[in-house]
Amino acid sequence: MTPVDTTELIAPEVLPTGREEAWRFTPFDRLNGLVSADTSIAAAPPWQVSASDDVELEWITGLGGARPLPEGVDLAARRAWEFAGGAQIIRIRQSLHVPETIQVVSNGVGGVVASELRVIAEPNSKAVVVIEHFGFGTHTDNVVVEVGAGADLTVVSVQSWDSTAVHLATHSLTLAQGSHLRHCVVTLGGDLVRIAPHVRFTGPGAEVELLGLFFATNGQHQEHRLRIEHSAPHCTSEVVYKGALRGSKTHTVWIGDVLIQPQAVGTKTYELNRNLVLGGGARADSVPNLEILTGEVVGAGHASATGRFDDEQLFYLQSRGIPSAEARRLVVRGFFADLLGRLNLPDLEDRLLATLDAELETDS
Amino acid sequence: MATLEIRDLHVEVDADGGPREILSGVDLTVRAGETHALMGPNGSGKSTLAYSIAGHPKYRVTSGSLTLDGVDLLALSVDARARAGVFLAMQYPVEVPGVSLSNFLRTSATAVRGEAPKLRLWIKELKASMAALSMDPSFAERNVNEGFSGGERKRSEILQFELLAPKIGILDETDSGLDVDALRVVSAGINRVRDLGGTGTLLITHFTRILRYVEPDFVHIFAGGRIVAEGGAELADEIESSGYERFLPAVTGGVV
């Protein structure tokens, strides 16, 4: 391999001002300098990975080569790549089926830190990877997922941060011919969390599901910024993001950009975002964007709705003797029920429901 | 014996241009085992009475009293009223997405009975009640009222009436939108509860149709936010032949 001149890779940074489309919703003053000029970023503590022996784990360093900068990422992800000091690689070899969930834990201990994770599912392999974030600190992450031809991969990212954590992450997801990726984001904790899944199709006939569940309270800012580029024919993308939010200054943002390139004939895409405002002056922004550059799509659509707790639903449940707190719990659980069913991870589901119930207990 | 007592009840709602009184002094007593039909034209306030008894926050009681066996219902929350024994079968029951009918019914039965019914017995009870209302068992796994037809919603309301066996059941236009077969099935459900003797039933309706299947002991004519005439089943027959005209507010002066 030819040595890489990293000085060339690290082109001068262009600092965002906050007025850019990509940053306009993000509260800069709470980013702890992650995308400002004078920030020093350290390497985060290593990812803790538990996987069966047939899964290959490796730590690679250096920029470029096996660690290219993913295309089109923002400054936060670029800095993650630059300052992470290396990347944790999880490789599922060709045709390997891994029945046990591969667990990845990121435990924040403070500071302004960067990390990178690369999941490579080789052709015709099958695996489930669950990434969980705990602790505190200011984090910028770069998560790169390559799904090989015919592979079937599930990646779940759970943000269970302490209430002070700041977390920016870009998930660069590439799908080769005939592959399937189910990508799930579950955001509960943190002061500011901004996750940006970017999907690219490199071969025909691939399918991606992007699922998201978020619950924001107490002034949290949670932003989910999706971009799907249909650049190969006959691929399918389906997005379902649902969030509940409560409390003054609580803000959730969902952006769903879908671009269907001229060559992407036979594309099928659908995006859905639902937000349930539980009160207290919380604000939800929901912005679907669909750009279609070919006349031959199978289907392309989106739906977005933000609603309040339905007083008539609560009245109905209460009129059957169900106390108000339990009625609310039923409605919120019901709101997320179809998503939880699709996640199909019973352990995670139980913990999620417990967290939701606990959040609802602290009535506001 | 359970007794619901409504005395000089006045209720208002917020309307354009300020509060508007809908109920203007309602007096009514319903005892366990009795069946009362409350009849009246559209807009007379029948549904307001039903919702006020159940405690819907939209309706504000400005004076009068509402008690069940001496307990002041006005001081109780919606759910506490239900646990005290009030049940309202709604005219337009809402959808609750993601909550299965079976989960909802068991949660409700647990709340009203004060303890969770034993699972095996509960399943048997539920199956039997559903079968009696000609409801397919798969119905229990559907989300509450989601995608239910009008008739299915009404069956589901009467299913709840049977399972919760309240002291007082208020059935708000349960007959509307039902075809004759569904009306028979639903009426049979109401009669089963009534025949147990522990429930007083207040049947709210425009039409006398359902009264052919559920025979009332008392008929009350409601107009202008209060009861303007009372009698037995024969009063319903009069409505059937002559309509409500003679009871409407403009000419109600002499009616006792």
Image (cartoon, rainbow, N blue to C red):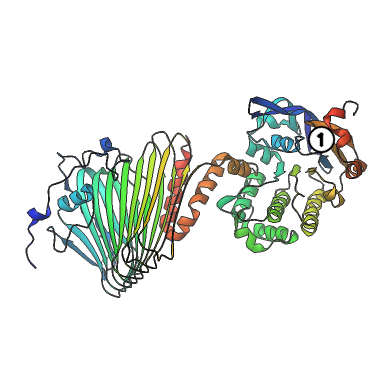
Outermost residue on the front side: it is A295
Residue A44 seen in the figure? no
Mark 1 surroundings within 10 Å by alpha-carbon count, few (fewer than 14), some (14 through 19), many (20 or more): many
Quarter holding the N terminus of chain A is bottom left
Residue A55 position in % (x across, y down): 26, 68
Q: Amino acid at mark 1?
A: Phe
Element at label 1: strand
Please report, as a chain letter, where disc 1 is located.
B
Outermost residue on the bottom side: it is A95
What is the total number of numbered labels drawn onto the structure image?
A: 1
Q: Is residue B191 above or below residue A50?
A: above
In screen coordinates, is B20 left or right of A271? right
Residue that carries the numbered disc 1 in the rendered image: B222
Residue B156 position in % (x across, y down): 69, 53
Residue at 63 percent of width and 45 percent of height:
B111
Q: Is residue B127 above or below residue B216?
A: below
Quarter of the image for residue B222 reads: top right
Residue A159 position in % (x across, y down): 34, 49
Residue A79 seen in the figure? yes
Residue at 33 percent of width and 67 percent of height:
A127
Question: Between B176 and A349, which is closer to the camera in this rendering?
Answer: B176
Question: Between A146 and A91, which is closer to the camera in this rendering?
Answer: A146
